[in-house]
Image (cartoon, rainbow, N blue to C red):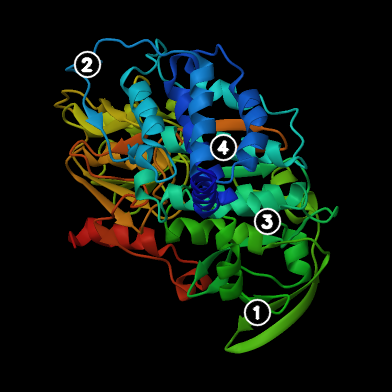
């Protein structure tokens, strides 16, 4: 009998010691998903009855001690039981009028190899008897408001960093409409980021990790503003001009500080090849980890300012002039001094909101024209043979008034997806936006729309609107591919945001990351900039005259 008992003990010991170990990364990745799912699905959590953040902080030490899959799964099962029972309800029927968009939806992780069958069944039961929201979706709806309660956290505390990571990851998991077209799967990003967050030595390392994580959304609306200065305590300095990247060179396109530029003989068309012995190509590669952009055109536009910003006053800049390389040892200054043109009264010529070009062609600058200018614009340009609407900028919201003028009938130009609050992670199609009206007296000339990488968000949406006029030709290059509104979040020591609703053409074609596809593609050249030409506008004028 003793031998039998001894054998049983030995077998049990072998079973215990042979049980597969579970890594900290595996535990935290799985916990993140369960915590976020319960946050938005469990009736008692989603309706705000519990301090769900504190519950996570309390459970993390237990989760850290779990050695096996069985121990880990049991902790999560008991946690769900402690919340309280979920009432079984009649099957939740999706209303007939709700058309779902499911490219972001994935709860297949319920069947995680780390989970017991009991845990997987509990999660599925909660999904089927989930919280039913009475809210209307908006940037201020309750699930987003709760993201602003983290101002007392200490980022030097590992559990607090984990909580912040979990909160952000799950907001994107359930409420980012373009998750399905990211370069990298959001699940994979979580697996990569968890160990880096755990290893962060200080606030700066942690915030840098979070910034790099936001970049992976491939969304031009993403911003990440840290409230801690990351310039080694020094005030940043700036080159007294800005520019455009062409063929891995930075071409000066606008002087921002006229006296400083004159002191160093900086002119529009100058070609910058290196800054502090680093090539523009090197800068382009280096900044990819920290700048979020929807496509390459958007990225090259956004990387210019960081390249022309330094944390030192003395900067060595290499130029290419007349086929020869010339290096200048420059002194860069703070924003105010390096952007003097913005602060000098009368220094800048006021931009025309509209004007008449040669050959009876109208031109409208969408960046400056406002609603109050529209009647005068119509009166001045209604008899022209063509109007060029320049959208290589951010417009003033005059799409409706102009569309009413150029369109012969009412046309739908955009439809949307937004989160379906009664089934988080799923989206629903929303009613689209129309422009124009039945108007026999609409503008009869050609409508030309100019776009490029500076055509961003509302600019792209406006181009979609003008395209419905029927006689519209879009000329230029790929736009920013960043369409939709912005949801912003305030966390301790940083502010961030992302695109909140999906924007599509009425036939379901995407605009995010793709942008507005021009009918005629044309890009500026180094030679054209140096000659002071607007090659995109020139191409538009050629098309107006020749039809080609």
Q: How crowded is mark 2: few (under 14 residues within 10 Å), some or many (20 or more)?
A: few
On the image, the x and y values in percent for residue 490 come to 64, 31
Of labels 3 and 1, the one closer to you = 1
On the image, the x and y values in percent for residue 285 come to 56, 69
Q: Name the residue under label 2.
A: 93
Q: Is mark 2 on a helix, strand or loop?
A: loop
Q: Taking the image as drawn, is residue 222 in sight? A: no
Q: Earlier in the sequence, mark 3 or mark 1?
A: 3
Q: Mark 1 points at which residue?
A: 319
Give the vertical position of 210 relative to 82 (above or below): below
Q: Mark 3 points at which residue?
A: 256
Distance, label 4 to label 2, CA atoms, is 30 Å
Q: Taking the image as drawn, is residue 219 in sight? A: yes
Give the vertical position of 130 relative to 236 (above or below): above
Q: In which quarter of the image is residue 130?
A: top left
Of labels 3 and 2, the one closer to you = 2
Q: 8 and 258: which one is in front? A: 8
Q: Residues within 10 Å of mark 4 (few under 14, many from 20)?
A: many
Distance, label 4 to label 1, CA atoms, is 46 Å
Distance, label 3 to label 1, CA atoms, is 18 Å
């Amino acid at each position: 009998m003793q031998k039998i008992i001894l054998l049983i003990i030995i077998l049990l010991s072998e079973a215990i010691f042979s049980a597969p170990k579970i890594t900290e990364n595996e535990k935290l990745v799985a916990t993140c998903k369960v915590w976020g799912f319960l946050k938005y699905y469990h009736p008692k959590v989603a309706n705000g009855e519990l301090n769900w953040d504190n519950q996570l902080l309390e459970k993390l030490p237990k989760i850290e001690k779990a050695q096996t899959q069985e121990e880990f799964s049991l902790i999560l099962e008991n946690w769900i039981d402690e919340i309280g029972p979920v009432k079984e309800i009649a099957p939740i029927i999706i209303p007939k009028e709700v058309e779902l968009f499911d490219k972001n939806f994935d709860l297949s992780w319920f069947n995680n190899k780390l989970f017991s069958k009991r845990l997987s069944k509990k999660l599925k039961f909660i999904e089927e008897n989930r919280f039913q929201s009475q809210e209307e979706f908006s940037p201020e709806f309750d699930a987003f408001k709760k993201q602003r309660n983290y101002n007392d956290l200490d980022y030097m505390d590992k559990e607090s960093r984990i909580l912040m990571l979990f909160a952000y990851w799950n907001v994107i998991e359930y409420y980012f409409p373009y998750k399905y077209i990211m370069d990298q799967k959001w699940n994979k990003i979580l697996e990569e980021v968890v160990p880096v967050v755990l290893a962060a030595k200080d606030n700066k390392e942690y915030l840098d990790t979070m910034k790099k994580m936001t970049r992976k959304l491939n969304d031009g609306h993403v911003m990440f503003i840290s409230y801690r200065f990351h310039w080694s305590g020094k005030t940043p300095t700036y080159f007294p001009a800005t520019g455009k990247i062409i063929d891995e060179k930075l071409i000066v396109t606008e002087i921002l500080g006229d006296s400083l530029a004159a002191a160093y003989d900086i002119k529009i068309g100058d070609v910058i090849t290196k800054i502090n012995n680093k090539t523009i190509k090197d800068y382009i590669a280096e900044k990819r980890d920290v700048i979020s952009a929807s496509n390459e055109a958007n990225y090259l536009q956004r990387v210019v300012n960081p390249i022309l910003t330094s944390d030192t006053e003395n900067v060595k800049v290499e130029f290419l002039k007349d086929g020869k390389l010339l290096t200048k040892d420059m002194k860069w200054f703070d924003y105010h001094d390096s952007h003097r043109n913005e602060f000098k009264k009368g220094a800048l010529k006021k931009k025309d909101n509209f004007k008449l070009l040669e050959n009876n062609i109208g031109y409208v600058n969408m960046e400056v024209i406002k609603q109050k200018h529209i009647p005068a614009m119509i009166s001045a340009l209604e008899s022209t043979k063509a109007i060029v609407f320049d959208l290589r900028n951010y417009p003033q919201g005059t799409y409706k008034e102009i569309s009413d003028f150029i369109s012969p009938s009412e046309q739908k130009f955009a439809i949307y997806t937004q989160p379906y609050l009664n089934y988080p992670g799923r989206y629903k199609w929303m009613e689209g936006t129309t422009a124009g009206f039945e108007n026999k007296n609409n503008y009869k000339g050609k409508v030309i729309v100019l776009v490029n990488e500076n055509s961003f968000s509302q600019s792209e949406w406006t181009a979609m609107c003008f395209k419905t006029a029927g006689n519209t030709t879009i000329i230029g290059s790929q736009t920013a591919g960043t369409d939709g509104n912005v949801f912003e979040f305030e966390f301790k020591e940083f502010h961030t945001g992302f695109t909140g609703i999906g924007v599509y053409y009425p036939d379901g074609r995407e605009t995010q990351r793709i942008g507005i596809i021009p009918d005629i593609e044309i890009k500026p050249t180094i030679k054209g900039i140096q000659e002071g030409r607007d090659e995109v506008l020139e191409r538009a004028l050629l098309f107006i005259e020749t039809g080609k």
